[in-house]
Image (cartoon, grey):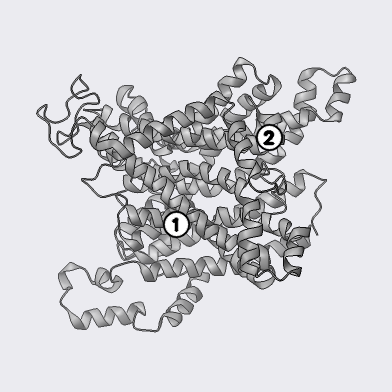
Amino acid sequence: MRTYILRRLAALVPVLFLVSVVTFSVNLLLPGDPALAYIGEANIGDKVMYEAVRQELGLDQPIPVQYVKWLGRAVRGDFGRSIRTREPALEGLLARLPITLQLSAMAMVISLVIAIPIGIISAVRPNSKLDTAGTVLAMTGVAVPDFWLAILLIYLFAVWLPWLPSSGFVPLAQGLWPNLQSMILPAVALGMVLSAVVMRQLRASLLEVLRQEYVVVARAKGLRERHVIGRHALKNALIPMVTVLGLQTGRLFGGAVLIETIFSLPGLGRLATDSILFRDYPMLLGTVLILATSVMLASLVTDVLYAVLDPRIRYT
Amino acid sequence: MAITAGTEPTHSQGATPRGRWSGTLLAGALQTRGAIFGLAVIAVVLVLAVGADLIAPYGPTRIQAAGVLAPPSLSYLLGTDQIGRDVSSRIIYGASVSIQAGVVSVGLALVLGVLVGLLAGYYGGWVDELLMRVVDALYAFPALLLALAVTAILGPGLTSVMLAIGVVFAPAFARLVRGQTLSIRERDFITAAHVVGVEPWRVMLVHIWPNVTAPIIVQASLLVGSAIVIEAGLSFLGLGVMPPTPSWGSMLKEGYQYMEQAPWLAFAPGAAIFLTVLAFNLVGDALQRALDPRLRRTVGA
């Protein structure tokens, strides 16, 4: 097991390297001149200042040198300074990361709360009316664009029934309830697609498990159906769900880009769009690198968890 | 890869002789009400996209006499927008943007991905390592974020969006084709082709490719929906199709700003995206079920 984890971590290195190359290339290819953006509109004609800024940002050096220097600083957590806010990029990133993590975590919890009961009912009573309703719900959930759902939720719960704020973020420091109030609609909008995916996965795997012989034995022993499902079948049926959740992390982060923009949440997704629009490249590179690394780590954790949960899987 | 395999529905049922699957696949897919509904919706959207000039009651940019933000009425079925244009006409014209974004970008991803997957699976060794690590790296980026970055590089517009989505979705095809190619490569008819001296590119395109087409078609039909959503998302952020060209995503963005005065502005384009995506998903699911007998048994509802 330990060798497996170490090997997976080692395999991350070349991929991370390529991720950094892709990210850096994006930076190079983006239109506009970061030095010009840095000195601002007022000093646009100032040649001396322009050259000084180019030197300060290292833009006068060959591209491979720029890359190596950037990477060297990035692995030490130094992503440079934000062009827009002038704050150190890492500080900005770390300030926004918890918001995106909270949003994703809440979205995940909401999706499980919706998906697990419906998935179980669908599998236990396949082809019943409830199952059909579940299938329709799942198909709807997968197809509904999360940003449209977000707009519908705002209309319903902030405009029509003024129960929740339509946008804006309240930090946890100002109280748990106000914080949750500001996050609940975004989390529901983000979690809906995930719940549909989990629902379908759970239904399929539970149906598969319920056909296994050990379930037949459990029933033949005279165990109550609640026991058969809850203690025996569900345990195995839930394992593939871990994989689904892990694989959906990227989708959650991608969805966060739009959801955070709509709800004015100052998270990483919002930061990514703002950085692109304002050509704030140090910030953009940091955001993209952090999000991509998180997705890869999530997939590693998923695989390891999968091995821990399913003793039949042995990694060497 | 090896770990997640088996938890997801497997597409591969081994190679089937060329030409046999297509008819059965379609017939099998059309057996559910969902698939028929999906095909019908796709047909309607296609007709709207192609015949917008004939079908739409007004031009997409013409300012109407009803004034701005007029509620839905008999002459303006979905009302008018913030500068007085007919929303229903703009939805009809917007169909062509969504269909193009969905179909062209997935087509591009398919060509790129299949090429990479065939090369990696056929040659193996360092070619495989290198290509697949690049694919892994691209896979690590959240799709929308990568598309956002590519669009930012290429500048806004439908072409950029299609290229961006093509790049973002290519890894999905590359992985699928690589896996299939790996197993087919070992089969006797490929060895036979090698023995008689068939060139590698011919083996790949003539002997391997036809045997991996079925799962690719399924994957493609499932990705068209996602591509349409990403295009709409990019347009929503202002990086996609530029005004005044009507696109469902940019209409949604404009409508969202007038939600309190005129909620229909945001409902109509969102519903159009939803229905179109639902249709492609239904057809994709049906194809997948028709292709995979195991899935047909377990999920067939």
Q: Give the numbered dot on residue B242.
A: none
The residue under the point 86% across, 29% down is A213
Indicate the position of residue A304 as horizontal and vertical percent values.
71, 52
> Which one is in front, A16 or B124?
B124
Subunit under mark 1: B
- Taking the image as shown, residue B230 lies to the left or right of residue A158, namely right
Subunit under mark 2: B
> Which one is in front, B252 or A118?
B252
| Amino acid at circle 1 | Leu
Q: Which of the image's four quarters has the C terminus of chain A?
A: bottom right
Q: Residue furthest left?
A: B65
- Taking the image as shown, residue B85 lies to the left or right of residue B213, namely left
Question: How far, Cα to Cα, is label 1 from label 2?
Answer: 32 Å
Would you say the residues marked 1 and 2 are in contact, meaning their CB atoms lie under 8 Å apart?
no
Q: Give the numbered dot on residue B295.
A: 2
Q: How many marks?
A: 2
Mark 1 vs mark 2: in front: 2
Q: Is residue A235 above or below residue B136?
A: above
Q: Disc 1 designates what residue?
A: B146
